[in-house]
Image (tube, helix red, strand yellow):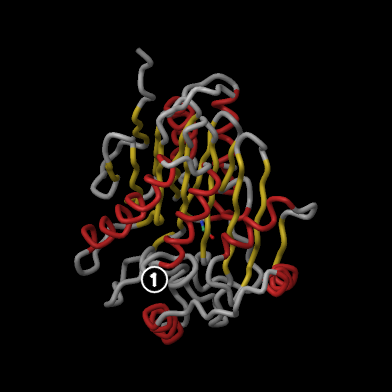
């Protein structure tokens, strides 16, 4: 790792899915995402590590009831919320996470606490024990909108296979989506980290495990870091995050790695999206779904992918050229 300071980079997502049809759709989501960038990017400028920025960014997104993670998580088939989150430190190449945890405000805090532990991925019962050890207060992440969504689906006998990508005041019949949140950061020392957190697909059977607490959905090395969103089963089948990162490690540029991986995912008719950074400061994103709710901070400007539609699978912003 170089001791030279680099320009920090930040990219975040709030899920992927079908179009934002709700009232105020794009603008409301844009405000939510940009607010997080505006709060986290200055921390990176002030010397926060990539891991610190990722944990804080995930907490803010988990606390926004619009997104399907933490507060505002979707309900499973039995009417319960079970959340999953993971954190990966790039230079240490160390993954930690929790699977199907309930009654916690910020699942990412549990994943963070496990970074230094010998046992780094805990599921339901063990994660609850950790919650007690950390003395985090019990918290109910359920919102009225998500409860209404579940009750509506129950009256329809759970015909829909998953919940809406974002929580919307009025239930939208075709808002099926794949909400999750994710944060990828490059700090001023050139270190990468990534975190991903989700309430799952919504209406799934008890015990179903999300990609968000697996290296398929959240993976980083010293070279690249990727967070995924979309249908967990599709992400797992493509091993999406790890696949992109390994391609970068093997010599492809971040853009090339996204391009090759999304071409394959498209051919396999997957429904997913991903965001990523590499250690040179390149930023990239890709989707096979209709929309990807992502926003980024290059150091010079904030941008987002909310109105990015059409056939194009991948887009990127190259690393700055050293003069
Ligand atoms: N990608 C979130 C999930 O399927 O659980």
Residue sitting at x 71%, y 68%: 130
What is the quadrant of the C terminus in the image?
top left
Percent position (x, y) of residue 21? 24, 64
Question: Is 169 on the left or on the right of 40, as rendered?
Answer: left
What is the quadrant of the N terminus in the image?
top right
Residue sitting at x 26%, y 58%: 31
Percent position (x, y) of residue 4? 50, 22
Residue sitting at x 47%, y 33%: 188
Question: Is 113 on the left or on the right of 297, as rendered?
Answer: right
Q: Residue furthest top?
A: 323
Image position of 66 with respect to 181: above or below:
below
Q: Residues within 10 Å of mark 1 (few under 14, many from 20)?
A: many
- Identify the residue under disc 1: 65
Q: Nearer the viewer, residue 80 or 10?
A: 10
Percent position (x, y) of residue 75? 50, 76
Splitting the image into 4 quarters, where does residue 317 fall?
top left
Residue sitting at x 39%, y 79%: 149
Image position of 30 with respect to 65: above or below:
above
Question: Is 108 on the left or on the right of 66, as rendered?
Answer: right
Image position of 237 with respect to 8: above or below:
below
């Amino acid at each position: 790792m170089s001791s030279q300071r680099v320009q920090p980079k930040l990219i975040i997502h709030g899920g992927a899915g079908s179009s934002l049809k709700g009232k105020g759709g794009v603008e409301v989501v844009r405000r939510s995402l940009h607010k997080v960038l505006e709060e986290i990017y200055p921390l990176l400028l002030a010397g926060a590590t990539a891991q610190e920025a990722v944990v804080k960014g995930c907490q803010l997104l988990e606390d926004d009831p619009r997104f399907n993670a933490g507060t505002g998580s979707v309900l499973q088939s039995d009417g319960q919320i079970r959340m999953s989150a993971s954190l990966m430190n790039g230079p240490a190449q160390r993954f930690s996470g929790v699977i199907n945890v309930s009654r916690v405000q910020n699942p990412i805090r549990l994943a963070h606490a496990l970074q230094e532990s010998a046992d780094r991925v805990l599921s339901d019962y063990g994660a609850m024990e950790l919650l007690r050890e950390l003395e985090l207060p019990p918290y109910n992440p359920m919102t009225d909108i998500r409860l209404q969504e579940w009750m509506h689906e129950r009256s329809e006998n759970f015909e829909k296979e998953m919940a809406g990508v974002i929580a919307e005041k009025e239930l939208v019949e075709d808002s099926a989506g794949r909400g999750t949140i994710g944060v990828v950061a490059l700090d001023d020392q050139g270190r990468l980290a990534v975190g991903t957190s989700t309430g799952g697909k919504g209406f799934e059977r008890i015990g179903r495990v999300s990609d968000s607490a697996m290296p398929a959905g959240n993976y980083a090395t010293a070279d690249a870091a990727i967070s995924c969103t979309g249908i967990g089963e599709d992400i797992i089948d493509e091993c999406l995050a790890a696949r992109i990162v390994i391609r970068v490690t093997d010599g492809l540029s971040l853009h090339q790695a996204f391009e090759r991986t999304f071409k394959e995912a498209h051919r396999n008719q997957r429904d997913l999206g991903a965001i990523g950074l590499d250690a040179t400061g390149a930023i990239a994103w890709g989707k096979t779904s209709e929309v990807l709710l992502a926003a980024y901070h290059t150091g010079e400007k904030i941008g987002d992918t909310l109105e990015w539609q059409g056939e194009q699978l991948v887009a990127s912003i190259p690393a700055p050229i050293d003069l």
